[in-house]
Image (cartoon, rainbow, N blue to C red):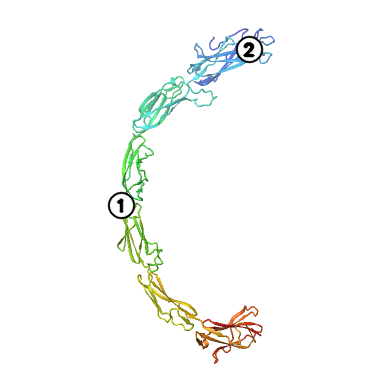
Amino acid sequence: MRGRVVARWTGATVGFLLAGSLVLPGLVAAATPTYGFTQSSPTPSTVNYSDLVTFRGAYTCLNGPDAGSYCPTTSLTETATFAIRPSGGSTFTTAATVTTSFTFASTSSGCPTTCSRPFQVVWKAGRAGSVTVPPGTYDVRLMTTLTADEVVLASALVVNQEGTTTTYTGVASGDEGTALALKATVADIDRGLLAGSGIWLPDVNFGASTALTFGLYDATDTTLVAGPVTASVSGSGTVLGSASLTLPAAGTYVLHTDYGGNAYYAASSDLDTITSNPANTAPSLSVPSPLTAEATSAAGAAVSYTVSASDAEDDPEPVPSCDWPSGSTFPLGTTTVHCTVTDSGGLGDAGSFTVTVVDTTAPLVTVSTSETAGASGWFNVLSNDSLPGLTVDVSAADLVGVATLACTDNGVAVAGLAPNGGSFVVGDGGHVVACAAMDAAGNVGQDDASFDVDETPPTAVALQGGGLLEGVAYDFGFVPEGPTGCSADFAVSGAGSCAVTGYSTLVGSWTVVATATDLAGNVATAELHYAVLPWTLDGFARPIDMTGLNAEKSGRQLSLKFHVWAGTTELVTPDVMASFTQTQVSCSAGTVIAGPVAAVSPDGLRYANSGTFVLGWLSPEQPGTCWVVTVTTLDGSSLSAAFRLR
């Protein structure tokens, strides 16, 4: 090998230029082909440690000068070996190899004058097989099994140091005086690029680097206050072990994380802000002052309260807990509530307060009745609930419960009442009912009511004055005067009123009623029964037919004769008549056509010397019509006769 470039010749010789150019001198006829190879520059020729480098070469076959093809057309299998050495060194180290199957001939007729077949291999910069090669400048040599020659590349392959980034990954705060766990990662600057970018991931030589150091500086980043601490780095770039720094007094600090680098990787560092918190202090528990609540049931009362805690370090504040949660139902009496709180650092505080449930509310007592008093305020028979006497209702209610209930009626104890109340009956007279209920706490509730009761109707009701006799029948016009008033015995509530009704002088059966009403509204009556008889009418005398249809001339005055008797007494004065009417009727059916209207009587009613009443009727001048003529006396009795006029 001569210097940086070496050329070897075989057979009739083939010249090679290391830049990849093939120089062909004047060819000499040969019976066999001449083989050789060429090498092109690696791509890329300047790389960072761990980048991928592509080595390329080509096999060649040179035919003889005579006609015909001598390069083989059958498949060949050859191995190419690329080796590197530090520039100017003496020993090559294999970097990569490739075994390739190929044919020189492109057709069955063989190659043209020169055949060339390329090959290539990819090598991770810094790795020659399993040997780690540090960054530097290297010669590249190519040898193949096709010939015994070698080619050394004229231009060198440059492998540079890999750039790195250092990232602190530990916690950023802690309590003063405690150990701050230190963690970091170191990565090359290529890490994270996509596949196919020419970057080999992950790199594996961090472990051979200078160790990481951690140093804590003051807030101005001028004075070292803790450290430095050294930690080893794994091959994958992570910190090994459990490095830590003791945090100084509370405050803000700057952490330096430095990676020293090595032959393969450049140095890098990271700056981070670290907070030292004050040392943990116990939380402070705040409980309310003693609480008092009014009982709402026999179980006690639901009581809500607020318990809080504060802590200098915790955010949010720690939450306390109590053995009686807020809103619990506390029993009557005093209950002690115990509360505790623990902060995130495990320190705690405790406290207690009392809740007293009292009963200061007196029972509610009600004295009433479901019966309704009359307008005067007295309870009478009509207001009765179908039971004798007045029913008094008593109720006693208390949120906690009634212990005892006692009632008196006009000062006399009432028996048989339950603590929550009941009913009892009082009779006629005035009553003052007073009741008192007491609960278990000694609270007393009271109520009273007055009731005036009179369920006894008046007695000895009697009619006063007048001439009527019980059961007597009187003729109309001869009825005695009625009673002028009434009397009664009003025993309990006193006199109210006594009224007489029912007196009449008209014909019929009558009952005179004396109604006595006491102040309570109770009513009693007394009755007197009598009758008023009608008069007896006799007529009309002949020639008037009282059952048939009388034929008379129209416009002619007829005399209607009759007698009026009151019992056995004949009446003779004309004032006995109340009315004299005529009604037009159908001559065939007898149904009313018009009327009744006042009949025409030129002379009126008179009592004749013959001992009869005579009434003249001037018939209408309407021949062919029929009429019914009626005389009605004061008692309501009447006489009627029918006429056909011609």
126 and 509: which one is in front? Answer: 509
The correct choice, above or below, for 501 with respect to 387 in the image is below
Q: Residue at x 49, y 12 (%)?
A: 89
**Cα–Cα span, label 1 and label 2:** 124 Å
- Residue farthest bottom in this picture: 609
**Residue that label 2 marks:** 61
Q: Residue 441: which disc?
A: 1
Q: Can you say which quadrant of the picture contains the N terminus? A: top right
Q: Can you say which quadrant of the picture contains the C terminus? A: bottom right
Q: Position of residue 344 (x, y in %)?
A: 37, 35
115 and 19: which one is in front? Answer: 115
* Residue type at tag 1: Ala
* Residue type at tag 2: Cys
Which image quarter: residue 611? bottom right
Q: Position of residue 546 (x, y in %)?
A: 60, 83
Looking at the rendered structure, the secondary structure element under dot 1 is: loop
Q: Residue 234: which disc?
A: none
Q: Is residue 17 visible?
A: no
Foreground disc of the pair 1, 2 = 1
Looking at the rendered structure, the secondary structure element under dot 2 is: strand
Q: Residues within 10 Å of mark 2 (few under 14, many from 20)?
A: many
Q: Position of residue 16 (x, y in %)?
A: 59, 12
